[in-house]
Amino acid sequence: MSQELTDRTIKKIEELASRYARKEAALLPVLHLVQNEVGFISPQEEKQVARLLDIKPIKVKEVVTFYTMYNQKAIGKYHIQVCSNLSCSLLGAESLIDHLKEKLGIGVGETTPDKKFTLTTVECLGACEQSPCMMINFDYFGNLDKEKIDDVLSKLK
Amino acid sequence: MADKILTKHFGLENLFKIDVYMKNDGYSAVKKALSGMKPDEILEEVKAANLRGRGGAGFPAGVKWGFVPKDSEKSKYLCVNADEGEPGTFKDRYILNHNPHLLIEGIIIASYCVGINTAFIYIRGEYEAVALRLEDAISAAYENGYLGDDILGTGFKLDVYVHRGAGAYICGEETALLESLEGKRGNPRLKPPFPASVGLFDCPTVINNVETISNIPSIIINGADWFCKMGLPKDGGTRIFGVSGMVKNPGIFELPVGMSLKKIIVEHAGGMKEGKTLKAVIPGGMSAPILKADEIEINMDFDALVEAKSMLGSAAIIVIDQDTSMLDVLKVITKFYSHESCGQCTPCRIGNAWINKIVKRIAEGGGKREDLDKIIQLANNMMGKTLCPLGDAAAMPILSIIQKFRDELESYIPLGN
């Protein structure tokens, strides 16, 4: 289920590539751009990106599989990422993850059948002063408890 | 407020906007440096200020800049490390969000000093909103003539780009960061050669943390002596201490280098949460060896922490209470390092996964008498035996927790096993 990149994205990719002494150095930002447009990076996107940056598709796959932020398959509309590192764990992250699993009826790493939510755990998000915290897509939510999570989720359409 | 450098103007509304920043003496250090100082003078000033790296290793910034060969015909690069992945650390996010022009100003001066025309800010992928704000600030700096082909009419040229990471702790390690900036997996490089001679695109490269670079403008304006007096003679300035965990008032506190750990926790972070008592403190990000409750009367500077067999690292303080089991702490720590090992070096790849497996088994009630000694053996096999410091970073907290909380950890192992 892939699609061709738009001309606008291709132009932006070329602009990104021009910033670096070697074109392929733009790979990480380019993958962010493509994921933003397509939703995830499938082998077809890997090939397109490889072609645009003049590298072998395996070089793209190496990067896509190394970094946790690139999705290799479709995820839900809202990607809930709960920090499970130390500061958040001290303040009850584990019980919040259990609460989310129960509320959404899915396990960690899974997507709800209506494709609305994907639940994952992540390492430190760099917002430890607001522990326990989570990120939904790119929005941060901190000082969480079960009620606050319920409130945040109820506002997502 | 006289004792603050980086967060001094944080109370101002819209400080992130260039007009507000400029109204409060912003970019005056760039004007002073580019119009009145020779690069060598700047280098001597930064060296004399004893500004030590704020990312973790504490290497003197001026010395690092001095390693870049002057006669190289290749392009030179500055890479600002805004990866901020060390668990417990969130200080750079505050600088980037509230005071991005302070960083840009530092970047301009550092680049002018070393003869650099291109700088990259490598920011962790999760900080998307912060990266956008930073890009806006960079655009404003171009519009006002502080970046571009002919900065303030001096002929000095500098371009600055933001490069977002994509979720990998290892990319905070400087050579992994370079690999990542070149569009590759974040596998650290063998050193030497060091980045100062062979770095980004095989060119001489300076890599400094956000907080380190953000200190440069104040050193230019006020001088090295002033900066040293703010902190300690051999470790100048302030640190942004980030406190998290079981305290009443978690957050960032910019205080002089050498401030007492106890004071930071009790006076600045408000002490323990209601009904909680202190058990242990991690003083410098998760990789730092743990301190017990009776070890916190210590000064927070690089040398004092080394003497206490821990480290100041990123000055991220994680406070642990008596109700928390050290086995749970060990479980979180070992899970993290086994997940974040890049897999390149066998002792780290296998060691961290193996240790995490043993800790999980103990937590599930299947611990054996010999387990703790096995973990110590595996951790010792990582120390100093990997290309990058991740092996050490994992081994240090693990070994210190077993050493200081062995009785408690043994209590989780069923008798007779």
Image (cartoon, coloured by chain):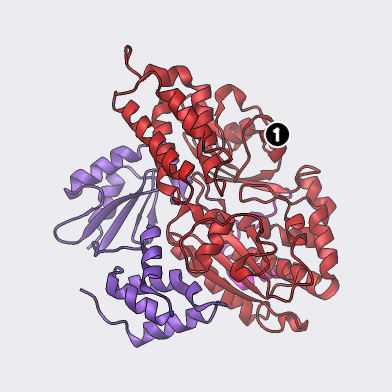
Chain colours: A purple, B red
As for residue B8 lying within the magenta part, the answer is yes
Residue reaching furthest to the front:
B346
Q: Is residue B324 visible?
A: no
Q: Residue at 74%, 50% (x, y): give it.
A: B2
Above or below, comparing residue B245 to residue B100 in the picture: above
**Towards the viewer: B340 or B29:** B340
Does residue B261 appear in the picture of this structure? yes
The magenta stretch spans which residues?
A: B1-23
Q: What residue is drawn where x is 76% and y is 47%?
A: B236
Taking the magenta stretch, the answer to whether it contains residue A88 is no
Hey, which residue is sitting farthest top in the picture?
B416
Q: Amino acid at mark 1?
A: Ala
Q: Position of residue B407 (x, y in %)?
A: 46, 16
Quadrant (top left, top right, bottom left, bottom right) of the C terminus of chain B: top left
Q: Secondary structure at mark 1?
A: helix
B106 sits to left or right of A155? right
Chain letter behind tag 1: B
The residue labelled by disc 1 is: B304
Question: At which x and y percent is residue A83?
Answer: 38, 47
**Which of the 4 quarters of the picture holds residue B296?**
top right
> Residue B135 at what x, y percent from top left?
53, 72
Above or below: residue B107 compared with residue A93: below
Q: Quadrant of residue B67?
A: bottom right
Taking the image as shown, residue B398 lies to the left or right of residue B260, namely: left
Q: Residue at x 70, y 47 (%)?
A: B238
Q: Nearer the viewer, residue B265 or B326?
A: B326
* Secondary structure that dominates the magenta span: loop
Q: Residue furthest left?
A: A113
In which image quadrant can residue A13 be found?
bottom left
Depicted A13 relative to depicted B248: above or below: below
